[in-house]
Image: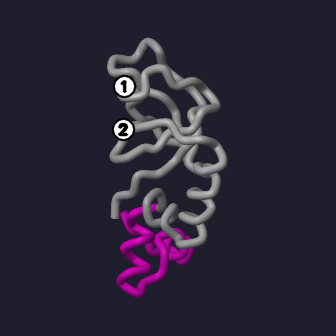
Amino acid sequence: MCLAVPGKVVAIDDSADPLTGLIDFGGVQKRACLEYVSDVRVGEYVIVHVGFALQRLDEESALASLKLFEELGLLEEEFGDAWDQAAKEAGGAPVAERQDSGSEAR
């Protein structure tokens, strides 16, 4: 599933073309294109979908959405390790557990 997730702008790269920034999604940080919200500032919240910040969002709404997404497990689904997610869905042990047991999955 691909969500439009609210995140906090923690850095902006003004020299990048297109304009990009580092966005914090409740502890997970990813780069996103900021061209659609080019006047956004560090500390503000944006909604990001497939790597593009689409609009600003007030802090209260962003934090409420992040909390709900976390409670529903959607943040892990969206930002978690794809190999671990696939293993869970297949009924196997997460990759980290398999690596600890001596059988590496790469």
Going by the numbered disc 2, the residue's amino acid type is Phe
Residue 15 lies in the magenta-colored region: no
Name the amino acid type tagged 1.
Answer: Glu
The correct choice, above or below, for 50 with respect to 43 in the image is below
| x then y, percent, for residue 101 | 54, 77
Q: Are marks 1 and 2 in contact (CB under 8 Å)?
A: yes
> For this view, does 44 lie left or right of residue 92?
right
* Rendered view: 8 above or below 97: above
Viewer-side residue, 56 vs 75: 56
Percent position (x, y) of residue 71?
Answer: 60, 71
Residue located at (36% from left, 73% from top): 86
Measured Cα–Cα span from mark 1 to mark 2: 8 Å
Magenta stretch holds residue 83:
yes
Q: Which mark is residue 35?
A: 1
Seen at 48% across and 29% down, the residue is 21
Q: Which residues are magenta?
A: 81-106
Give the number of the disc on residue 52. Answer: 2
Residue shown at the point (51%, 25%) measured from the top left: 40
| Residue 95 to residue 49: above or below | below
Q: Which of the labelled discs sits on residue 105, or is there none?
A: none
Place residue 55 in its image quadrant. top left
Indicate the position of residue 20 as horizontal and vertical percent values.
42, 26
Quarter holding the C terminus is: bottom left
Helix, strand or loop at label 2? It is strand
Query: Mark 1 vs mark 2: which is more N-terminal?
Result: 1
